[in-house]
Image (cartoon, rainbow, N blue to C red):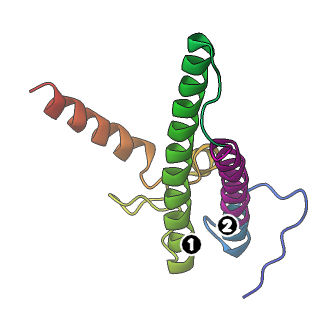
Amino acid sequence: MMVTLPPDYRPSDREDFMNPVQTEYFRQKLLRWRADLLKEANGTLASLSEGGIREADITDRASVETDRALELRTRDRARKLIAKIDQALGRIESGSYGFCEDTGEPIGLKRLEARPIATLSIEAQERHERMERAYRDD
């Protein structure tokens, strides 16, 4: 089913949660984010493939190495985010997007606006983090 978004559409608590228009809004938001990450990653790849380090000065060489390490970390982070975006798009396809994986409750529009790849409600996320801390402190 094709859904057309009004240009100024913003999800609202006054409408049914994850109705077709809301779902399409988040689908487009995720696709835009994914495209931006891919564009950035391609730029990083181009600068990484510019070849070996030619700087004679040891300080310059260290600076280039540091930049390269940062770019590689950025790429890795982007790759992980793209995987999470793909999973979120899969949840949109299956109809489970926007609902907490633990409780099945709606995650909430504010949280999804801020973090469209969220899989847990704030309460479930806080519970999860408390348990992680408890196990880490052992």
Is label 1 in a helix, a strand or a loop? Answer: helix
* Magenta residue span: 28-50
Name above or below for residue 67 compared with residue 98.
above
Which residue is the site of mark 1? Answer: 92
- Distance of label 2 from label 1 (alpha carbons): 7 Å
Q: Nearer the viewer, residue 11 or 120?
A: 120
- Image mark for residue 42: none
Question: CB atoms at circles 2 and 1 under 8 Å apart?
Answer: yes
Residue 96 % position (x, y): 48, 71
* Residue located 64% across and 49% down the image: 45
Name above or below for residue 24 compared with residue 57.
below
Q: Residue furthest front?
A: 56
Determine crowd level at label 2: few under 14, some 14-19, many 20+ residues with C-alpha closer than 10 A: many
Please give left or right for residue 130 compared with residue 29 in the image. left
Q: Residue furthest left?
A: 138
* Residue located 60% across and 27% down the image: 67
Q: Amino acid at mark 1?
A: Ile
* Residue located 44% across and 49% down the image: 121
Residue 46 % position (x, y): 70, 48
Please give left or right for residue 21 compared with residue 82 in the image. right
Q: Nearer the viewer, residue 14 or 66?
A: 66
Residue 54 % position (x, y): 64, 29
Which residue is the site of mark 2? Answer: 27
Name above or below for residue 59 compared with residue 7.
above
* N-term mark: 2 or 1: 2
Is label 2 in a helix, a strand or a loop? Answer: helix
Q: Residue furthest right?
A: 7
Q: Amino acid at mark 2?
A: Arg
| Main secondary structure of the magenta stretch | helix
Name above or below for residue 78 compared with residue 92.
above
* Residue located 56% across and 48% down the image: 78
